[in-house]
Image (cartoon, rainbow, N blue to C red):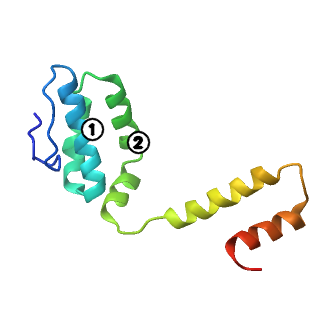
Amino acid sequence: MCKVGMYTGGIRLRKHQNGWRHQCLTVQVTVMVKQGFVDQLDSWLKACATASIAQVQHFALGIRQDYAAVRAALELPWSNGQTEEQANRLQFIKRQMYGRAHFDLLRLRVLYSSGFT
């Protein structure tokens, strides 16, 4: 059973009959990801398996299917945030330019926006 302050980051949880467990599991996974509490992952997944909420069970099933990647993301300090940001920026520029110009203008626009002109 969830306890306030257990690894919920001290967030106060409201006591509702059906919503209590869902809110507790949600807060736990949020704190676990932000703080990198790898040792709590297995117990959280077990708690989700016994939850009566289908969405929580489905979310936990997805994490179990990619367990190694999730565990590595919690353990390791590295992030691919910068790579994702650059890919997202390039995709945004491409969508803006779709049907308006050819590759030469797209190349110049990407270089200009990144400061390499």
First in residue order: circle 2 vs circle 1 = 1
- Does residue 58 lie above or below 68 as drawn? above
In the image, taking residue 33 as reference, residue 110 lies left or right, namely right
- Secondary element type, mark 2: helix
- Does residue 63 lie above or below 91 as drawn? above
Q: Which residue is mark 1?
A: 26
> Closer to the camera, 28 or 58?
28
In the image, taking residue 105 as reference, residue 81 lies left or right, namely left
Q: Residue at 15% x, 35% y: name it.
A: 13
Q: Residue at 36% x, 27% y: name it.
A: 55
Residue pushed farthest bottom?
A: 117
Residue 92 position, x and y percent, is 69, 54
Quadrant where the image shows the N terminus: top left
- Secondary element type, mark 1: helix
In the image, taking residue 49 as reference, residue 96 lies left or right, namely right
Q: Which mark is residue 65?
A: 2
- What type is the residue that disc 2 sits on? Gln
In the image, taking residue 69 as reference, residue 27 lies left or right, namely left
- Does residue 46 lie above or below 74 as drawn? above
> Closer to the camera, 15 or 41?
15
Quarter of image, res 88? bottom right
